[in-house]
Amino acid sequence: MNGMNHWRRMVFASCALAFAVYNASFGQPAHVPDYDRDKFGGWTDNDYDCRNTRHELLADLSTLPVTYSEDGCRVERGRWYDPYTGIIFVDASDLDIDHIVPLHWAWRHGAWRWTEDLLIEFANNPINLFAVDDGTNQAKGADGPLSWLPPNEHFQCQYVLRFWRVILSYGLDVDPAERVALIEQQDQLCQ
């Protein structure tokens, strides 16, 4: 009987270890630390020209020359096409810079393990940013494409493809069921 109990403990320990390894490989830790937006830092000014990521992106995405604030640090006016809504904007104050893969979504999918530098890089990487209608961005919140898609149906395929590009570029964790659902969604939207 003693040998049988030892064998059962070994099997149980092996199963527990396999389960832990399986979950760790798909980003399902026993406890994800609480999300803290501040860990991603704010908009950076990497070239020290007084224009942070928001204003650099607004200047880059405008289809007309932009108007800057008196000090030259902030973009105030230009012409932007919002791919989420299909609407043209001319006042920068009407736009948010959206993280295609939301910071909170990324945190829950493995970013909580990253260094401070990588968190800040992710939050400021233009590959993960769009200038969009502020109300639409706020409606999106921290949702991924399984819960939220841009109202502009003509952009939904590009949105999910960009979302995939970002999560693959940063090695974010996607559990098997979510991966299948995301692939099915991509296939449906990108026919």
Image (cartoon, rainbow, N blue to C red):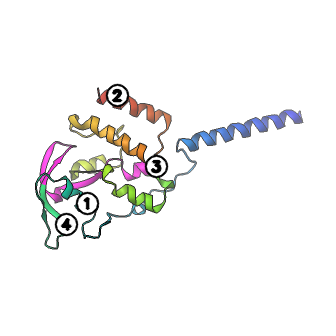
Precedes in sequence: disc 1 or disc 2:
1
Precedes in sequence: disc 2 or disc 4:
4
Work out which residue is located at the far bottom of the displayed protein and give it.
71
Q: Residue tagged by mark 4?
A: 74
Q: Residue at x 22, y 62 (%)?
A: 55
Q: Which mark is residue 187?
A: 2
| SS of the residue under disc 4 | loop
148 left or right of 15? Answer: left
Q: Report the amino acid beneath label 1.
A: Arg
| SS of the residue under disc 3 | helix
Query: Closer to us: mark 1 or mark 3?
Result: 1
Q: Residue tagged by mark 3?
A: 108
Range drawn in magenta: 79-106
Q: CA distance from mark 1 to mark 3?
A: 24 Å
Precedes in sequence: disc 4 or disc 3:
4
Q: CA distance from mark 1 to mark 2?
A: 32 Å
Q: CA distance from mark 4 to mark 1?
A: 9 Å
Q: Residue at x 72, y 38 (%)?
A: 14
Q: Report the amino acid beneath label 2.
A: Asp
| SS of the residue under disc 1 | helix
What x and y, as percent, mark residue 162?
32, 42
Query: Closer to us: mark 4 or mark 3?
Result: 4
Precedes in sequence: disc 1 or disc 3:
1
What x and y, as percent, mark residue 70?
13, 72
Dots 1, 3 in contact, CB < 8 A? no
Q: Residues within 10 Å of mark 3 (few under 14, many from 20)?
A: many
- Quadrant placement of the N terminus: top right
Q: Residue tagged by mark 1?
A: 54
45 left or right of 20? Answer: left
